[in-house]
């Protein structure tokens, strides 16, 4: 009888296998994907100019339309970039890379963390590009609002890095972005990214709080619009992130068992 290897009995490295070398390689590989990088940079800027010239926001919103639009599109850009970065795991699955990882002591949490950080770095680029476009075209905000809004637009995109990673395990490689793209559009519209939720029909306003974009849009615009901070915004963000990141870890563990 030939003994079989018990991979789960191997000693676990520090931090479950998380290391800067692996992170560096993941970032470099992502940046080599020119289609993903260009999509994450060009599309948000084009949308910003499109919505900026479309209409003016009512004064009741308490801020100029260009600034509100810029923050919303920056969130969408971070969302698009982070999701695309996370969804690249579908390519790895098709190549059998995720099963090869089963031969290493890498833990699901460490793998998911590296993927999320990589996707978030691409999201940061998208946010910065949109804010630069806004600055060039004359968007007016205080210095503190510029910095805080950009930071929140980027940080809150973590939920979509988790979403991309989760969908990368659910969908086949050839269909992943074709399905995710329209879904992101639906999330953005119903969550109030393109147009603030308060200006949309009541039926959409009742659906919006359940969208993963709801908390993201509200938190990112809070430094600009002010008012009372609603804890449900943060609750929405945390719950969706935990569900999607946890689901990605479960699917990674299941996928790597197929050795």
Image: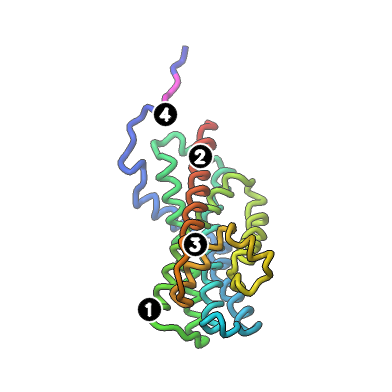
- Which residue corresponds to mark 4? 7
Asked if the residue at tag 4 contacts the one at tag 1, i.e. Cβ–Cβ closer than 8 Å, the answer is: no
Query: Which secondary structure type mostly characterizes the magenta part of the structure?
Result: loop
Rendering coords of residue 50 (x, y %): 64, 79
Rendering coords of residue 30 (x, y %): 49, 58
Q: Which mark is residue 144?
A: 1
Left or right of 46 in this view: 220: left
For label 1, the SS is helix
Which badge, 2 or 3, is on the more N-terminal residue?
Answer: 3
Choose between 156 and 23: the one closer to the eye.
156
Which badge, 1 or 2, is on the more N-terminal residue?
Answer: 1
Q: Magenta segment, which residues?
A: 4-8
Alpha carbon distance from label 1 to label 4: 51 Å
Left or right of 85 in this view: 189: right
For label 4, the SS is helix
Q: Farthest bottom residue?
A: 138
- Which residue corresponds to mark 2? 250
Alpha carbon distance from label 2 to label 3: 26 Å
- Which residue corresponds to mark 3? 233
Which badge, 4 or 2, is on the more N-terminal residue?
Answer: 4
Alpha carbon distance from label 1 to label 2: 40 Å
Which badge, 3 or 4, is on the more N-terminal residue?
Answer: 4
Label 2 Cα crowd, 10 Å radius (few <14 / some 14-19 / many 20+): some
């Amino acid at each position: 009888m030939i003994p079989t290897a018990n991979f789960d009995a191997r000693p676990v490295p520090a931090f479950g296998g998380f290391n800067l070398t692996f992170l560096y390689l993941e970032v470099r590989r992502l940046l080599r994907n020119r289609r993903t990088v260009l999509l994450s940079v060009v599309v948000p800027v084009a949308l910003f100019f499109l919505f900026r010239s479309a209409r003016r926001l009512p004064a009741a919103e308490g801020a100029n339309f260009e600034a509100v639009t810029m923050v919303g599109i920056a969130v969408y850009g971070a969302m698009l970039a982070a999701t695309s970065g996370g969804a690249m795991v579908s390519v790895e699955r098709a190549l059998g890379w995720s099963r090869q990882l089963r031969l290493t002591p890498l833990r699901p949490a460490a793998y998911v963390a590296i993927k999320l950080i990589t996707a978030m770095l691409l999201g940061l680029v998208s946010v910065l590009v949109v804010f630069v476009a806004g600055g060039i075209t004359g968007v007016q905000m205080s210095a503190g609002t510029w910095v805080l809004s950009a930071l929140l637009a980027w940080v809150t995109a973590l939920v979509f890095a988790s979403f991309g990673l989760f969908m990368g395990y659910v969908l086949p490689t050839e269909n992943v972005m074709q399905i995710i793209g329209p879904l992101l559009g639906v999330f953005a519209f119903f969550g109030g990214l393109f147009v603030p939720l308060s200006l949309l029909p009541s039926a959409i306003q009742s659906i919006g709080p359940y969208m993963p974009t709801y908390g993201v849009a509200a938190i990112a615009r809070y430094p600009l619009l002010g008012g009372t901070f609603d804890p449900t915004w943060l609750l929405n963000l945390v719950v969706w992130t935990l569900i999607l990141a946890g689901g990605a870890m479960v699917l990674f563990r299941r996928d790597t068992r197929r050795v």
